[in-house]
Each structure stands twice: as structure tokens, then as C-alpha cells.
Amino acid sequence: MAEEVQILVTCDKDVVTARQQGRATALAAGFSNSEATLVATAISELARNIVSYANRGTVTVARLNGHKGAAGLKIVASDAGPGIADVAQALRDGYSSSGGLGLGLPGVRRLMDDFDIASVPGSGTTVTVTKWLK
Amino acid sequence: MQVPILKQGNVLIATIQAALTDADLLELRSGLVQQVVRYRSSGVIVDVTAMDVMDSFASRTLLEISRMIRLRGADTVIVGIQPEVAFAMVQLGVTLEDIPTALDLEEGLAYLQQTSRSIN
Amino acid sequence: MARERHALTAAASAKSRLVDLPRGEPRAELHRELVGHLRQNRTQLREEWVARIGEARLLQAMTQEEIFAEATSVYDSYVAALETGTLDDLTAYARNLSERIIPRGVETHEVVGIVLLLRDVLARSLFAKYQADFEKLNRILDAYEPAANRIANTVAVGFVQERERVIRQQQEAIRELSTPVLQVRERLLILPIIGVIDPMRARQLTEQLLRGIRENRAKVVVIDITGVAAMDATVANHLVQTVEASRLLGATVIVTGLSPEIAQTLVTIGVDLGKMNTVGDLQGGIEQAERLLGYKVELG
């Protein structure tokens, strides 16, 4: 019942493709332009993390027609990269393992409604975020 | 996608016309710095009206552009940030810190004129 | 939930046949008989229904005359729906009725209540008429009950949908009203915030202001929060984000009417008040805004 698109992310062009795909799906799902921009921004951050830290991975954008009629958009960013040793630390503002502005994960969490991260050092990271239609 | 840089008097205007990849942004950075040096420009306007998303990489690159150009004695103004993009930026936590911003190109030019006059 | 979905489906398929009329002569015959009975006893059944509505203390927002007039229309639409087998007219009537009675404060349970009462009154009269012939009573009720249930559904769902539409509309209107973006002079916007701000309203307010800045080409915005009694950390964060987002569009924000309590909240969440442009009251804020604008106009 959920329509979904998966984008293979291996370079910076794919980051743009992923977020444009995400925006289009968000608009089609009934999100406002403003909310679709929040979604696209979150995808941009997640996809860039894949390119920067894991070289390759996937971003999946799925429309949800969930429980109790709640509808939304679920984004899963998944890679088989080095993983994050200290997830709690990566979720704190200002943390970065490569200098600069960091992984942007706290920001992504603020942009979306639900946020979930599973990371195993040495075998990869999966970030799942959801935005609900209000 | 290359960003065209126009020279108007002693101001350089870079108009972003579509979504930019990270490589495009880095190219814009080096292009602008080179041209500021070449033309001894006093101001730079980056028009981001067409940008779909201003994520952490884009805003960090704009900050770098502004600082590098500052070292050359010129000011940078970012113009044309869309309301929904601004809303997403503050949620993400990127605010372009102290780079001057203006509504659009016209306002950006007015701002540069005013700052250069106040120096003179 | 399942029941609600079923009800919605029933309303959505109002165009479909209400009862399977063509299935053999006896069934159609039963139907004609049923409708005939309800027509013949219209006056008595209708009065009985109105009396029951009164006893149940339903529709108290309406006068006796109004109840009688509406009851007559509902009764006739009801019988017509049974006769023609389509719910279209009844659906339209239910919607129209809802539009008229919702502003009077009629509640959902009252509308459901009166339709169920009508079903009950009619079923009792069928019992009374056919009680001697148990076989026939059974067949009549088999024909009547499913139709009566779908009619009850249609009316109730129509009412609930109309009510939800009205509520949505009102909420929208209240939100717009409670966060007016006023242009007091060229390039100057004032946003007086009054009352309780929740995250939802704060977000709406931000979006409205950002659009307003763009549309009015505003350079200075005065956000007056004198009328805001309290602010939790989440909403205070929104305020800071609003100030930052406005700046990204090229507008300067002046915050006026900051109470010591709210100032304390802002400091607690780590806001550098020195970086925020604050002025004691709205008047002072407007004066500063005009200075900012005047200064720029002189130079530009």
C-alpha cells in the first residue's frame, strides 16, 4: 500500500537527486511547500552523510497510509559504512567526526517528526525519519 | 551546473539558477574568489532565489565564500532566500551567522552601496 | 475505527441502491406495503416521533415549531429514500439540515439520537401492525432494518462531516485572526502576539510572518509579545527561530514587551539576549524601527 522510491547514493549528484525525489513525493503526498522543504533538507543531510562517510548507500522515500488514518512520509537512509561509535554523541549539537558542522543529525531530528538511528561500528548505519501529515 | 558570475561596476553578482551539487558550490567558491581578486571588486552578491534547499554544506560554503572575500576587503550579501528555505534552515540550525542578507538583488545592491558610502 | 470507516463508505456510496428492489416480486411488494404504511400513518408517526424527541430532551436549542418542521422534512425524505431506494436526496437534505443546526449548537449525539428514535418509532408501528402475522413481520423487518440503518448512517455521517468542516474552518479563521501581520507603514510590519502560543501556532505564525516579509518587502519587523503571558522552552525556541529566519530574508526583527519571566526562559535555553534586538514597549519598538528605516532611506 505504500509507494516507495529508492535512490542509490554514491556521489554528490545523487544527493541532489534524492532530495528532489523526496520533495516531489512529499508534495504528492499532500505536504505543504514549506514542509516539503523540511523533508528535502533532511534528505540532503542524510544523503550527504552517506557519501562522506560510507561512499555508497541508499535513500528510500516511502509514503505511509498508516494506522488510524495517519499519513506521512518515511525516509530510510542506509549504508554499510564504518558506522558511528558513539551515537549519543553524534546526536548532540556541534559534534563532528570530520570537522566543520558535523553530521547534522540533531538538525535532521528537528526537521522531522520521528527520528530513529541504528548504527553498528564496522557494519553500517541506518537512519529512519518520518514526517506526519497534520 | 555552472553558476554565471556577472560583473556590474565594482560588484560581482553570482546568480544560482538551479539546485547545486557540492562540487558546483565549491566551484562557485573558487570562481568568486578568483574574480574578486582579478577585478578588485568591493562587493559580491550571491542570489540564491532558485536554490531548493540550503543544507549544512551549502551554508558552510557560503560562509567560507564570505570570509575569503572579506580577506580581500570586499563584502558579500546573500539575497533571495525563500521563506520556506529560511524556515528549514533555522530548524536545521544553520543561520549564515553574520553574513549580511537582503530580500532580493535590488536590496542587495542598495545594501552594498550604503555600506561603501558609509566607509567613504 | 472499523465502524467509522464503514459509515464513511455508506455515505460515499449513497448513489448506490439502498435496497435490492428487483429481487423478485414479493420483496418489491413488501417494500410498497412498507412505504404505504408509513405514508398513511404520516401524521400520527411524525407526532409520536416529535413527542419522543421532547421526552429524550434532544434538540433543546430549537423551538417546538422548528423541531416539528424539520421532523416533517426528515420524515418525508426518509420515506422517499425507502421508496426510491436512493440516498441522494436524503444526503443532500442531511447536509443542508446540518448547516442550519450546527450554528445553533446542536450536538452529534442529538442528531444520531433523533434518527435512532425515528427508526424505533417506525419499527414499533410495524410491530403493532403485523404482530398477528409473525412470518410477515419478519419479512417486513428484514426489508426495513438494513435500509433504516443505512439511512441513520447517512444522516449521522453527513452531520459529522459538516461539523468537522465547520470546526476546521473556524480553527483556520481563529489562527489567522490571532496572528495578524500588520503593515503600519512601508517596509515595516508589526506582529502583535496575544494569548497562549503552542508549537503549532508558533509555527504558523513564523510561516505567516516570513510570507508577509516577502510580500510586503519588509525591512523591519516588530514582534510585540506584551500579550503573551508565558512561554515554555519550545515556544521560546520558535521565537528565536522566527527572528533568525526573518533575518535570512533580509529583515531586522525588534522584539517588544518581553516580560522578565520570558526573558528568563530565553536565557535558560541559551539565547544571548544581547544579540536579540529588544525594546521595552511597542511604541519604543516602532520608533526604533522608523529610525532604522529612516536611516536607510537617507542613505539609499
Image (cartoon, rainbow, N blue to C red):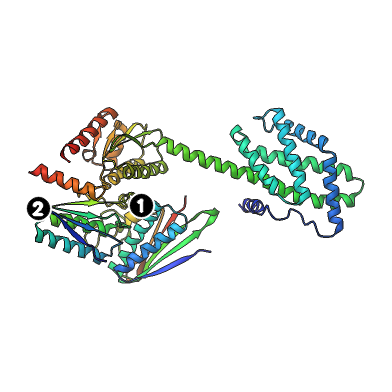
Query: Which quadrant is the N terminus of chain B positioned in?
Result: bottom left
The disc numbered 2 marks a residue on which chain? B
Residue at 88%, 51% (x, y): give it. Answer: C136
Number of numbered markers? 2
Residue A100, position as x, y percentages in the image: 22, 59
Kindly report the distance in space between the C-alpha atoms of the residues bearing marks 2 and 1.
37 Å
Q: Residue furthest front?
A: B9
Q: Evaluate whether residue C56 shows in this view.
A: no
Q: Residue at x 42, y 68 (%)?
A: A6
Percent position of residue B82, x then y: 32, 51
Q: Are marks 2 and 1 in contact (CB under 8 Å)?
A: no
Query: Mark 2, mark 1: which one is toward the viewer?
Result: 2
Q: Quadrant of residue C203?
A: top left
Query: In the picture provided, is C28 more to the left or to the right than A117?
Result: right
Q: Amino acid at mark 1?
A: Arg
Q: Chain of mark 1?
A: A
Left or right: B117 with respect to B77?
A: left
| Numbered disc 2: secondary structure | loop
Viewer-proximal residue, B63 or C264? Answer: B63
Any part of residue B52 in sight:
yes
Q: Which residue is mark 2?
A: B73
Say which residue label 1 marks.
A110
- Specify the amino acid type for callout 2: Gly
Q: In the picture shown, does residue A17 fall above or below C241?
A: below
Expressed as whole percent of the image width and height from the top left, the position of residue C70 reads 71, 35
